[in-house]
């Protein structure tokens, strides 16, 4: 409807007998017509420009540069909104748009161009290439977002002498790169990992009991015999406490007894940090993040020799290396905050998903208990390593893999530092390559039928499946998660101990919780808001 048609005061005026009013009104209407037609022209012009731009960008350019991946068409300003609402849904739509072809395609979101690689052979190429594809860019971005200055980032990513003091550095790498080797030294199979695993065993032995669970912030006790907990929240709090104590000793809990709950609040809002949401919309995420960083800062003010319960080799070694570069105070706390995040963000959720699946399949739960029984003497976990043996505990192994397959969200992202060929397509410097693991995990050609169902038989029937390059819950290549052995150890022994010591049952008949597929995380998906459910834990009388 044009404004001139609707202008009732002017229609009244036209009926007036005063000729001057009439002249005025006619000129006035003509003015309105002028304005509306010039507006219309502007709209038509802008639309034509937009259509021309779209034609140029998504039809002409791909013809001029057939060696580059085709881009999934969009209108200005890109796919940011759709990516934000459901990134995996967007990637699936894009793949369908290109006829489910195996070629990499491009996609623009948040002003960045991502080349999406969905073919396994090409993803292997991407993971192998650490020369022109950089993971460090992602870590540096996190450091910047969380408060490290450019000076500190430069110090951490400047090559160091081969003969420096502290950790050996035969390749003359920067501390940022050397840190990957330090993680591996602590977490890959060997004596250092066994030390941490024994700490986990000791922690579980001390804390998986009625008294301690009752003291959890989220627990309620309906009677003196049992305790009820919201499973997602409780697993999260318990696992964060476990990871924190095992890595940092008890000093951190003494400094801030509520740190696990504070971290949990931050971690459930981590998508705001990953999308670099404006500060005015993120105070709910920023406040708990600042508090975790402040507590870590206070922790590092306590001399290493005075920290109770000791701490993992990695924490002290990282602190020494950072201080040698002149990085201390809050800057040191921010760097170690990323480690606190890596230790705690995924394991808590994986423990929850394993238990959720078992609670909805009681036969599977019984099989889990049967297989892990030889690891216990009475209520005591005496041989946790037996639970890691896939031959002795095939169902435990299959539950672990199927849970990771279904609840894994992560996508590996690398910055392209020089034009790079992947799958015969040229990927241009300055853009990013993305390998979306979740899409690979639902490939029927690899994982068999009904990939949206939780089925342990796919792992039981194919012992090589966990080695498939389509199964990437921990990423791959040089930056593959170094914590994967400790994560599996902690989750499987925790679940086994809990089921050994307690009758675990659903309170009521809650539906299976829905995963929050929309919001980005760094590995395992959270549940949708409102989907947490209560379980009742009753100690097994025969074991008391
Ligand atoms: C089930 C639990 C876990 C999952 C699903 C998981 C997943 C991942 C993923 C997807 C990556 C990124 C790999 C890439 O982009 O190439 C990663 C990296 C990493 N994870 Fe984990 N993770 C888990 C537990 C842990 C634990 C318990 C620790 C430490 C104790 C840990 C330490 C790390 C570190 C240090 C990195 C960075 C890799 C590097 O720079 O060396 N993760 N993890």
Image: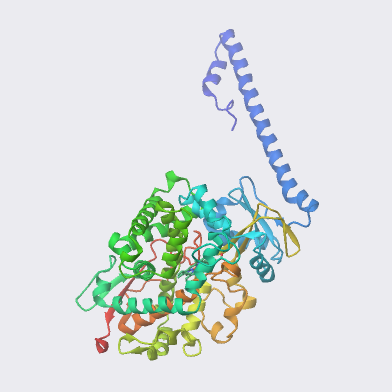
399 up-or-down from 515: above or below: below
> Residue 262's x, y, as percent?
34, 58
Left or right placement of residue 190 versus residue 63 in this view: left
Q: Nearer the viewer, residue 66 or 257?
A: 257
Q: Nearer the viewer, residue 373 or 419?
A: 419
Q: Is residue 414 visible?
A: yes
Viewport quadrant of the C terminus? bottom left
Residue 458 position, x and y percent, is: 56, 82
Q: How is the image coloured?
A: rainbow
Say above or below: 522 vs 52.
Answer: below
x, y percentage for residue 414?
A: 61, 59
Quadrant of the drawing holding the N terminus: top right
Q: Position of residue 372 (x, y in %)?
A: 40, 87
User: Left or right: where does residue 161 sit relative to residue 498?
Assistant: right
Between 70 and 47, the residue placed more toward the observer is 70
User: Is residue 341 at all visible to an observer of this figure?
Assistant: no
Q: Quadrant of residue 506?
A: bottom left
Question: From the viewer's perspective, is residue 397 above or below residue 45?
Answer: below
Residue farthest to the right, as pictured: 64
Residue occupying the point 58% across, 27% down = 5
> Splitting the image into 4 quarters, where does residue 14 fall?
top right
Q: Nearer the viewer, residue 326 or 503?
A: 326
322 sits to left or right of 121? left
**Residue shown at 44%/45% (left/top)?**
279
Indicate left or right for 148 with 55 as reference: left
- Establish if 483 lies above or below 160: below
| Count of marks overlaid on the render | 0
């Amino acid at each position: 409807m044009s404004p001139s048609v609707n202008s009732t005061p002017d229609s009244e005026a036209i009926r007036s007998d005063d000729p001057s009013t009439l002249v005025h009104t006619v000129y006035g209407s003509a003015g309105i017509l002028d304005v509306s037609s010039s507006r219309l022209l502007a709209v038509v012009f802008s639309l034509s420009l937009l259509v021309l731009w779209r034609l140029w960008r998504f039809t002409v350019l791909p013809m001029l540069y057939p060696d580059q991946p085709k881009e999934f068409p969009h209108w200005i300003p890109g796919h940011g909104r759709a990516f934000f609402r459901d990134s995996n849904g967007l990637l699936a739509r894009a793949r369908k748009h290109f006829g489910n072809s195996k070629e990499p395609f491009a996609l623009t979101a948040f002003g960045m161009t991502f080349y999406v690689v969905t073919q396994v052979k090409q993803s292997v190429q991407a993971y192998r290439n650490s020369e022109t594809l950089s993971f460090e860019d992602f870590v540096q971005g996190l450091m910047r977002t969380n408060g490290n200055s450019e000076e500190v980032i430069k110090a951490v990513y400047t090559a160091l002498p081969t003969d420096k003091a502290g950790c050996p550095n035969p390749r003359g790498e920067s501390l940022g790169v050397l840190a990957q080797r330090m993680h591996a030294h602590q977490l890959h199979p060997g004596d250092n990992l066994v030390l941490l695993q024994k700490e986990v065993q000791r922690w579980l032995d001390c804390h998986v009991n009625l008294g301690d669970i009752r003291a959890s912030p989220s627990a309620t006790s309906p009677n003196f015999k049992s305790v009820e907990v919201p499973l997602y929240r409780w697993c999260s709090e318990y696992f964060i406490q476990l990871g924190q104590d095992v890595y940092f000793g008890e000093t951190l809990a003494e400094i801030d007894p509520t740190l696990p709950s504070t971290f949990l609040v931050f971690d459930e809002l981590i998508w705001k940090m990953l999308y670099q949401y404006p500060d005015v919309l993120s105070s709910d995420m920023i406040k708990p993040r600042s508090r975790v960083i402040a507590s870590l800062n206070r922790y590092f003010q306590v001399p290493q020799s005075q920290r109770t319960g000791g701490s993992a080799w990695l924490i002290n070694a990282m602190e020494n290396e950072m201080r040698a570069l002149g990085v201390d105070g809050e800057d040191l706390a921010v760097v170690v905050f990323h480690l606190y995040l890596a230790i705690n963000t995924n394991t808590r959720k994986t423990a929850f998903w394993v238990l959720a699946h078992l609670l909805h399949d009681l036969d599977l739960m019984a099989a889990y208990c049967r297989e892990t029984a030889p690891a216990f003497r009475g209520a005591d976990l005496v041989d946790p390593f037996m639970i890691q043996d896939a031959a002795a505990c095939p169902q435990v192994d299959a539950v672990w893999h199927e849970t990771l397959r279904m609840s894994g969200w992560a996508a590996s992202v690398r910055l392209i530092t020089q034009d790079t060929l992947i799958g015969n397509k040229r990927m241009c410097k300055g853009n990013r390559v993305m390998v979306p693991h979740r899409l690979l995990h639902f490939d029927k050609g690899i994982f068999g039928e009904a990939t949206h169902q939780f089925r342990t038989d796919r792992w039981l029937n194919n012992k090589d499946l966990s080695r498939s390059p389509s199964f990437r819950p921990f990423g791959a290549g040089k930056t593959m998660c170094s914590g994967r052995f400790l994560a599996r150890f902690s989750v499987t022994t925790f679940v086994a101990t809990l089921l050994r010591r307690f009758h675990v049952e659903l309170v009521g008949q809650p539906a299976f919780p829905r995963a929050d597929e929309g919001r980005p995380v760094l590995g395992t998906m959270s549940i949708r808001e409102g989907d947490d459910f209560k379980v009742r834990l009753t100690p097994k009388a025969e074991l008391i």
